[in-house]
């Protein structure tokens, strides 16, 4: 320890930051020969919990710098030596100096007295990080810890913010905001959210391949599904409805129909059962406002039906289904799905849906997890009905059971509500007289 009140060599060391074994050097802001002032930031350090600017406690000329960006240091490590300009300026007592750890004398120590510099009024700019700090060693960007924290909170890689409008090109909060605005205007790439892309693979190394362009519908559907997948916390709930009686009624109905008349499939009853459920549980006939602050409840009942076409999946919307008969709905779906398969649907045919049904029952399956067609809040999946032995309290009886899969946006619907909604649909299908109520 040397006299702080005389000219001499002052050591700047890593302060006590609370028993942290490894501290990252994010940025070194001084170099040999720089004339620095008291309280001037000499380096930015980060632990996994906090970020701090290390102020100098001495005014003078930097003689030697012992660290570089990307280094890992620990408490007490020597950062730099400063030739103190004159007595008094290196007064260690002036800045709050909580935690300077005495270091061994510097090897190259000149004859001038070595001043034990309270380099670290460490608490000066300690910023608690909300999350563990991402490894940011070696980052060249000049920015204060608070600006780095701000950038991290927005998911911005600060090294990508090229233009700093502060002194000596330092990045300010406004520069980070402008960067975000620019990225948003250009259409945010996935990397902003920190989602790593899947690396390209040369499959021809393993055998013969052929490249087939995706159809426009597939590309657009893919983008939309990815957006939904990333934005909605989704839950899928499974149940099955006893449609034995409904199926008997449907068959009787179809038997009455003429050759050229559109046959009624189970889907029409599912639409009706779903609408009755939406009346009972209005939050399923709703959309979350874009700011996520309110629910927009809809007073109309438009149902989207996922239709499989050679070019990909499309979702025509049947409007005001609550006002239409089962036969009308069957005719309308037949017309819209034929149009869909011929690629003749207009954008208006696919707009304004309240909830979507995705029925794979004609193909098979026992269950699946459909993805919500946001901004709708739920989707009902249907797979193939199957005769099953069902226990009626006395004996097993053969019943036709229809598997149902309800995926919902958990920000809007909670689990119990989802289960009650599904129970209502199940009851409506099991006893279609309920649809009259
Ligand atoms: N269980 C048992 N049989 C079923 C059934 C079910 N759940 N659903 C339909 N069927 C039967 C129908 O009764 C019909 O039988 P018949 O030929 O003996 O009359 C047959 O399967 C074919 O029905 P369909 O599929 O033509 O008619 P639909 O009204 O049930 O469905 C439509 C119409 C447009 C939804 C359907 O054709 C379709 O495209 N489905 C695919 C949807 C899709 O790709 N979803 C995946 C999206 S990913 O989320």
Image (spheres, rainbow, N blue to C red):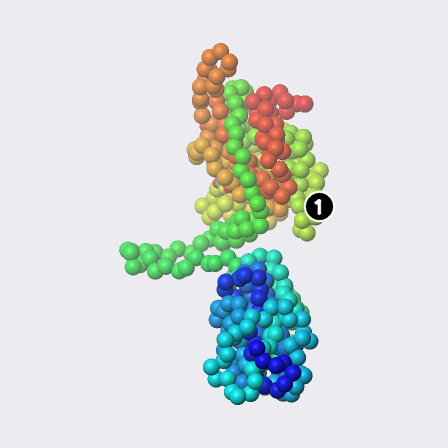
Which residue lies at the image location 61% right of the left edge and 64% below the top edge?
149
Please provide percent x and percent y for residue 162: 57, 73
Query: To which quarter of the image does residue 426 belong?
Result: top right
Q: Which residue carries the number 1 mark?
A: 294
Q: Measured along the vertical axis of the image, is residue 338 above or below residue 156?
A: above
Identify which residue, 119 or 29, lies in the foreground.
119
Identify which residue, 192 or 259, lies in the foreground.
192
The quarter in which the C terminus is drawn is: top right
Please provide percent x and percent y for residue 192: 55, 61
Identify which residue, 284 or 156, lies in the foreground.
156
278 on left or right of 202: right
Please provide percent x and percent y for residue 176: 63, 68
Query: To which quarter of the image does residue 326 belong?
Result: top right
Query: To which quarter of the image does residue 142 belong?
Result: bottom right
Q: Can residue 287 be seen by looking at this rendering?
A: yes
Q: For numbered disc 1, what is the local secondary structure?
A: loop
89 on left or right of 429: right
Please provide percent x and percent y for residue 389: 44, 19
Q: Measured along the vertical axis of the image, is residue 389 above or below residue 338?
A: above
Which residue lies at the image location 64% right of the left edge and 71% below the top edge?
97
The quarter in which the N terminus is drawn is: bottom right
Count of numbered circles on the image: 1
């Amino acid at each position: 320890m040397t006299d702080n009140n005389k000219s001499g060599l002052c050591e700047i060391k890593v302060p006590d930051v609370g028993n942290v074994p490894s501290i990252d050097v994010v940025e070194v802001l001084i170099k040999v020969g720089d004339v620095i002032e008291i309280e001037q930031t000499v380096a930015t350090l980060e632990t996994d919990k906090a970020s701090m600017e290390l102020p100098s406690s001495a005014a003078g000329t930097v003689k030697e710098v012992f660290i570089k960006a990307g280094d890992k240091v620990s408490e007490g490590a020597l950062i730099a030596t400063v030739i103190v300009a004159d007595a008094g300026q290196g007064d260690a007592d002036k800045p709050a100096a909580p935690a300077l750890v005495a270091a061994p004398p510097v090897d190259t120590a000149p004859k001038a007295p070595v001043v034990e510099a309270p380099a670290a009024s460490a608490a000066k700019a300690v910023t608690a990080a909300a999350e563990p700090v991402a490894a940011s060693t070696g980052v060249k960007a000049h920015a204060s810890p608070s600006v780095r924290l701000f950038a991290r909170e927005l998911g911005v890689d600060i090294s990508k913010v090229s233009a700093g409008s502060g002194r000596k090109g330092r990045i300010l909060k406004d520069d980070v905001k402008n960067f975000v605005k620019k990225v948003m205007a250009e259409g945010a790439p996935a990397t902003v959210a920190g989602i790593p892309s899947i690396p390209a693979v040369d499959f021809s190394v393993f055998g013969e391949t052929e490249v087939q362009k995706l159809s426009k519908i597939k590309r657009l559907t893919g983008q939309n599904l990815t957006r939904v997948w990333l934005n909605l916390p989704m839950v899928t709930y499974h149940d099955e409805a006893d449609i034995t009686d409904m199926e008997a009624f449907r068959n009787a109905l179809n038997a009455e129909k003429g050759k050229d008349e559109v046959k009624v499939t189970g889907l029409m009853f599912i639409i009706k059962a779903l609408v009755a459920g939406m009346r009972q549980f209005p939050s399923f006939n709703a959309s979350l406002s874009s700011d996520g602050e309110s629910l927009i409840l809809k007073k109309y009942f438009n149902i989207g039906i996922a239709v499989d076409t050679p070019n990909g999946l499309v979702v025509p919307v049947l409007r005001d289904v609550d006002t239409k008969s089962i036969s009308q709905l069957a005719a309308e779906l037949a017309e819209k799905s034929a149009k869909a398969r011929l690629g003749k649907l207009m954008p208006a045919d696919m707009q304004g849906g309240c909830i979507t049904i995705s029925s794979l029952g004609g193909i098979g399956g026992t269950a699946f997890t459909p993805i919500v067609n946001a901004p709708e809040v739920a989707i009902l999946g249907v797979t193939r009905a199957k005769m099953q032995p069902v226990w009626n309290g006395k004996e097993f009886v053969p019943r036709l059971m229809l598997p149902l899969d309800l995926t919902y946006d958990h920000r809007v619907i909670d689990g119990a509500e989802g289960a009650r909604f599904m129970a209502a649909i199940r009851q409506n299908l099991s006893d279609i007289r309920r649809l009259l109520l």
